[in-house]
Image (cartoon, rainbow, N blue to C red):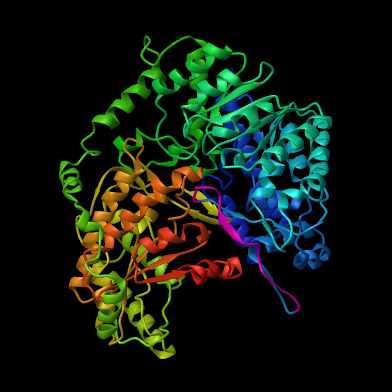
Amino acid sequence: MLTHNLGYPRIGGQRELKRACEQFWAGEILLPELLRTGRGIRRANWSIQKDAGIQLIPSNDFSFYDHVLDTSLMVGNIPSRFKPLLDVEQGALHYLYFAMARGYQDSALDITALEMTKWFDTNYHYLVPEFTANQSFEFLSSKVIEEFIEAKNQGIITKPVLLGPVSYLLLGKEKEPGFHRIELLDTLLPVYQKVLNLLQNLGADWVQIDEPCLVLNLDKKVKDAYLGAYEQLSLSSTVKILLATYFGGLEDNAHIAMSLPVAAIHIDAVRSPEQVLGIANIIPGDMALSLGIVDGRNIWKNNFNKSLCLIDTAMKVLGDDRLMIAPSCSLLHVPCDLDLEVDETILRAEVKTWMAFAKQKILEIVELARLREAKLGPFDGDYGNAFKNQRDILSRQQSTLVHNREVQKRLESVSRKDYKREAMHEVRKIAQQRVLNLPFYPTTTIGSFPQTRQVRELRSKYRKGLISIECYKHSLQGEIQKTIRWQEDVGIDVLVHGEFERNDMVEYFGELLNGFAFTQNGWVQSYGTRCVKPPVIYGDVSRPTPMTVEWTAYAQSLTSKPVKGMLTGPVTILQWSFVRDDQPRSVTATQIALAIRDEVLDLERVGINIIQVDEPAIREGLPIRTEDWAAYLGWAVKAFRLSVSGVQHQTQIHTHMCYSEFNDIIEAIAAMDADVITIETSRSQMELLDAFAHFK
């Protein structure tokens, strides 16, 4: 039974990649030093996995910014506006690479970056490939080859990882009308054939090709494209292809996947455990099955007992020689190492025992393989790690930290009227205008003002106890006062207080809510060098005290213009956290909504008549399959409405959304019943406006 990994976090345990990239962009270090940092992270990642006992270790899972952008560079998909940068200087590909990610400006050029959007239903963002009719591709960046050689020189024959050609095309956008990007497949495949041949000649035994789009709803044209593409790739080399799917079940695409001429197929047995038996029964006799058995999306410790049952289900059909064990998806989505969490004042010891980060998940994979090979269960004898695993699982199930009867009673008391404003929008609009007296096109900002170094240092000093709470509050009030005066001076109609007290739009609220835990070094990549430390929702959620009222009320006291209360919505808090997996997500969202509702009502009570509840993540929570959308949108919309529907007619509710495609959920956005919606359109060339312009 082979153990393998689909991908490892690339930011470094201490965010070394973030610092190096930002220093390079600022001109503080040169390209060779940036490249050295990348090599150091890759080598450390390979060593961790080798020492743990993983048999097939990935390469080319590292990226300086984004793996989809890496693929664009590999296949020479460079939009014409970036072509002048190909001739800049030595190392031009790296400068071109970052320009495509971040845009480029100098005295002669002003180039817009590629659009950025969410990677399936995760909080990771990728750079969207752009396609034009009849474009050509070429093997431009040899990064995948170079990193295989680098690992080989370290004594490790890796399993190179490629984003599959069909998924790559499907994840992009046509930049001109009259064609479908899947029509470019025949011109794209020769690049993949060349890469496979080069890797084979260098001694690669396995190549992992990720085709996550195989879990989506696909039309016949795309299904045929899969069959043709892999038939062609199988003829180009003898390297063994492990086709990786994740984030959902294969569903009606299972027979297509089983028809592909590949050596193994990986399925997500965490998101879709019910598919294991069905796939095991139809998989061809010459194909191995990789079970994604450890959750690559969340930080909870694997339940060995449940995982071993799933492994046994597949083994009864296939035996152990045709089984592989891996995480459900790349470990890109979880922090690097739980061992770095040493401060119990931040993460209490009991909660830590329930968790596993990337390094620990790798060890879980190896341990599950050992247990099965030894024909042991988690309770057999004194098999140390397995016994501890079940003890920790039981501890979490029984902990009083997790379950709060008062929260559960309040949840049971929620009625239908709590989800609905008392008046229709037309009535509210009149009442709001009477109170607010805004111009026909009022101006405002999204909410947060720049977090200067001085502000960050102020918060840091306060957290460390270096300044008193009185000094901290006085300094923040000074920042708020400057921000209010500036907005008045430039003529903004609806003001904000600037959010200088906040470290992050989710973390800030999580720190003030019961049921949340935090980490020292639980960083994950959101995009590029943007790393976040998602809160951990481990228990029932409630709000012990007001969270924003003091700062917002102070800002309102400085001006006669309306000041917006600024809150993060329940679905975004849920989506941007590591969420408990012992109850439905809808239940956790409702608990958060009740906490936000309390804050909304307290803001209204002190005279705040405009309250913005941001839900930028509402679309990214959509299930992979469209047939599951209605159920998700049902509870997501209800959570938002529960959080805001207790206010009076004259209180104007805003929401804000960004970096997602909203066209296909416009009805759900309308059903949220916000009075004002603010959307981001700058990175999508204003495309999102079409949905609102044509909505009736």
Question: Which one is in front, 688 or 359?
Answer: 688
Vertical comparison of 140 with 420: above or below: above
Residue drawn at (42%, 66%) of the image: 656
Percent coordinates x, y for residue 35 in the rendering: 70, 51
Judge whether residue 393 is colored magenta.
no
213 lies above or below 379: below
Whether residue 192 is visible, yes or no, is yes
Q: With 539 as the anchor, is 614 left or right in this view?
A: right
The relative height of residue 525 versus residue 61 in the rendered view (above or below) is: below
Count of numbered circles in the view = 0
Residue 421 coordinates in the image, percent (x, y): 24, 65
State the image quarter where residue 440 is shown.
Answer: bottom left
Image quarter hosting the C terminus: bottom left
- Depth check: give the residue in front, 111 or 65: 111
Q: Name the spot of residue 568 as percent of width and height, x first.
A: 35, 61
The correct choice, above or below, for 662 with respect to 62 in the image is below
Q: Residue at 44% x, 41% y: name it.
A: 340
- Regarding residue 558, the answer to whether it shows in the image is no
Residue depicted at x 59% and y 59%: 116
- Farthest front residue? 696
Please tell me which residue lies in front, 673 or 497: 673
Q: What stretch is highlighted in magenta?
A: 108-123
- Location of residue 667 by image quarter: bottom left
Image spot of residue 66 (x, y percent) = 63, 51
Q: Main secondary structure of the magenta part?
A: loop
Query: Which quadrant does the N terminus fall into?
Result: top right
